[in-house]
Amino acid sequence: MKKPDCDAKLKQLNTRPLGSWKEASPVSDITIRNQTELKHYEAVLNGEVVAFAEYRPLEGAVMFAHTEVNESIEGKGIGSALIRQALDETRAAGKWVIPMCPFVVGFIQRHPEYVEAVNPQHRRIFGI
């Protein structure tokens, strides 16, 4: 069951009009930022949040709990760009990644260069 704030974010994300998103080259035109007060990374395209990845900071690790991408632009690489930056920043901070979100698990499975970001004792749990 999703948390109420996540449901509200998802509803807002998926009901926004496309506007110029169709004309934009999403991956090259996005800005990804870590909203630490909201505990999520977000991808912004043309001034609108089009994707987010929620996380929970822990001692020595960051748990990635949930990722959403506006359904009208799924498959454009925005979710992957979002997770790539989040994982890169987590590794740069010297913290382990705990990929509770299936999208993050799938990303790591498709990009073996990120496997070492997951604690070796936890990799089997996530099928990594």
Image: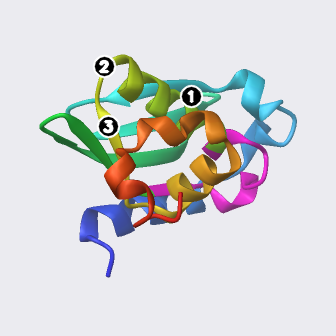
In this rendering, which labeled residue sits more in front, label 1 or label 2?
A: 2
Amino acid of disc 3: Trp
CA–CA distance in space, label 1 to label 2: 28 Å
Q: Position of residue 92 (x, y in %)?
A: 38, 17
Q: Which mark is residue 47?
A: 1
Q: Secondary structure at mark 1?
A: loop
Q: Cβ–Cβ below 8 Å for labels 1 and 2? A: no
The residue lying at 34 percent from left, 63 percent from top is 6
Residue extending furthest toward the right: 23
Q: Are marks 3 and 2 in contact (CB under 8 Å)?
A: no
Secondary structure at badge 3 equals: strand
Is 29 displayed left or right of 39 in the figure?
A: right
Please provide percent x and percent y for residue 115: 53, 42
Work out whether residue 85 or residue 60 is closer to the camera in this orientation and state it: 60
From which residue to which does the magenta span run? Answer: 67-79
Image position of 11 with respect to 87: above or below:
below
Q: Is residue 21 visible?
A: yes
Q: Which residue is mark 3?
A: 96
